[in-house]
């Protein structure tokens, strides 16, 4: 029984899907005239590393019996296949680890910007540190799994290797799988505290909950990795599904990390997604067109380090460039308990900070803008 179709399916579907999500993410940035963020760069880096993993999977499948049983071949040819297979596995393990790490840090960087004044800011930082420790340990153990390193793929070398590589995979993979589900739970905790109508709350929770698919793929990958036996002559066949799920996990991590930032794309092509139309002027302001002057709320109201610099105020989704991702996850009418401010209170603070020259004589400020009263 061949598993080659499974391998090709794990390449043909996830790779273009993650690439499309990444392209739409960049396009959403352009639509909202937001600057390129660190989380965007990390997500792009994660995709390219995942692409390298997929290329190795293609090389292994087309040249060295990945997903196929070796059968009755001459011993020298079998030794060559197994040696090349372990070489590919060695490199792919490093690429897999770094792709997953970069995706995690991309999501956590996005969370840190969105929830920087939230109660979950400390857990976000802790998870960043844990991710850094995880990738350090994982990379070190992968490279120095055998001493000398070449003994991992060259069985003619008399070296010392870890006795149970399955336990190694189990320990490191379970750790990052657990972190995946914790990362998933963090924004859900914040969204549940927001005052949203039921439909809107379900929509936001649904977007973030799609990240659980990465955890599911990780669970399957862990289960298949336990079947690894270094001495087996059918190793390329037996380990093929673990490689398949690892590839799916890498690209799924990139895909789901982009979803929360695609709301401008969805709103453009799906009429009625939001209750009011929003335009994106070059000055970074977004003015709701609702006649009842309802303000489009972001996760929280923020203020910059300089209270006198009104350009750095973020007024519940009004000042986009100072809080660039508000439009990706915000919904009309959302306020966070204990972390909002009345419009009147903000305007009083504004009037105390602005000079008389902020508004030209004889010109009425526009309704819904930062210069409105």
Image (cartoon, grey):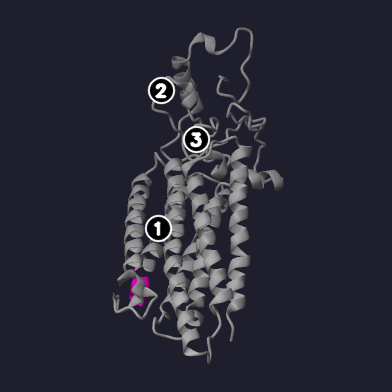
Give coordinates of residue 222: x percent, y percent: 43, 72
* Residue at image mark 3: 323
* Residue at image mark 1: 182
Secondary element under disc 3, as helix, strand or loop, is loop
Residue located 46% across and 64% down the image:
215
Give coordinates of residue 242: x percent, y percent: 48, 74
Give coordinates of residue 243: x percent, y percent: 49, 72
Front residue (pair 107, 65): 65
Evaluate whether residue 205 shows in this view.
no
Secondary element under disc 1, as helix, strand or loop, is helix
Where 282 falls versus 80 (above or below)? above
Secondary element under disc 2, as helix, strand or loop, is loop
Residue located 59% across and 24% down the image:
369
Say if mark 2 contacts mark 1, CB within 8 Å.
no
Left or right of 165: which side holds 216? right
**Main SS, magenta residues:** helix
Specify whether residue 169 is painted magenta.
yes
Sequence order check, earlier mark of 2 and 1: 1
Left or right of 80: which side holds 288? right
Q: Quadrant of residue 366?
A: top right
Where 21 falls versus 358 (above or below)? below
Q: Quadrant of residue 276?
A: top right
* Residue at image mark 2: 307
Where 141 falls versus 108 (above or below)? below
C-alpha separation, residue under disc 3 versus residue under disc 1: 25 Å
What's drawn in magenta, residue-wise? 166-171
């Amino acid at each position: 029984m061949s598993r080659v179709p499974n391998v090709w399916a794990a390449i043909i579907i996830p790779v273009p899907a993650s690439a499309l999500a990444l392209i739409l993410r960049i396009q959403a940035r352009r639509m909202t005239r937001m600057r390129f963020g660190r989380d965007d760069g990390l997500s792009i880096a994660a995709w390219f590393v995942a692409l390298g993993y997929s290329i190795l999977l293609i090389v292994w499948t087309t040249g060295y019996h990945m997903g196929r049983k070796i059968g009755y071949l001459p011993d020298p040819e079998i030794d060559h296949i197994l040696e090349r297979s372990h070489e590919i596995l060695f490199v792919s393990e490093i690429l897999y680890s770094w792709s997953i790490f970069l995706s995690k840090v991309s999501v956590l960087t996005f969370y840190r910007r969105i929830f920087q004044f939230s109660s979950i800011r400390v857990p976000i930082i802790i998870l960043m540190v844990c991710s850094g420790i995880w990738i350090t340990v994982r990379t070190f153990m992968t490279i120095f799994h055998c001493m000398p390193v070449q003994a991992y793929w060259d069985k003619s070398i008399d070296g010392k290797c870890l006795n149970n590589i399955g336990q190694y995979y189990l320990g490191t993979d379970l750790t990052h799988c657990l972190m995946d589900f914790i990362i998933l739970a963090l924004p859900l905790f914040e969204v549940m505290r927001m005052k949203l109508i039921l439909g809107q709350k379900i929509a936001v929770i649904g977007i973030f909950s799609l990240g659980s698919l990465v955890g599911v793929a990780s669970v399957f990958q862990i289960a298949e990795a336990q079947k690894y036996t270094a001495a087996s002559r059918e190793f390329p066949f037996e380990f093929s599904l673990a490689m398949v799920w690892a590839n799916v996990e890498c690209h799924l991590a990139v895909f789901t990390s982009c979803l929360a930032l695609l709301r401008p794309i969805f709103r453009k092509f799906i009429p009625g997604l939001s209750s009011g139309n929003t335009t994106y002027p070059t000055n970074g302001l977004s003015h709701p067109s609702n006649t009842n002057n309802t303000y489009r709320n972001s996760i929280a109201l923020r203020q910059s380090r300089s209270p006198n610099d009104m350009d750095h105020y973020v007024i519940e989704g009004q000042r986009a460039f100072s809080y660039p991702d508000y439009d990706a996850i915000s919904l009309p009418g959302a306020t966070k308990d204990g972390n909002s401010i009345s419009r009147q209170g903000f305007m009083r603070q504004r009037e105390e900070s602005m000079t008389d020259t902020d508004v030209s004589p004889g010109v009425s400020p526009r309704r819904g803008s930062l210069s409105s009263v």
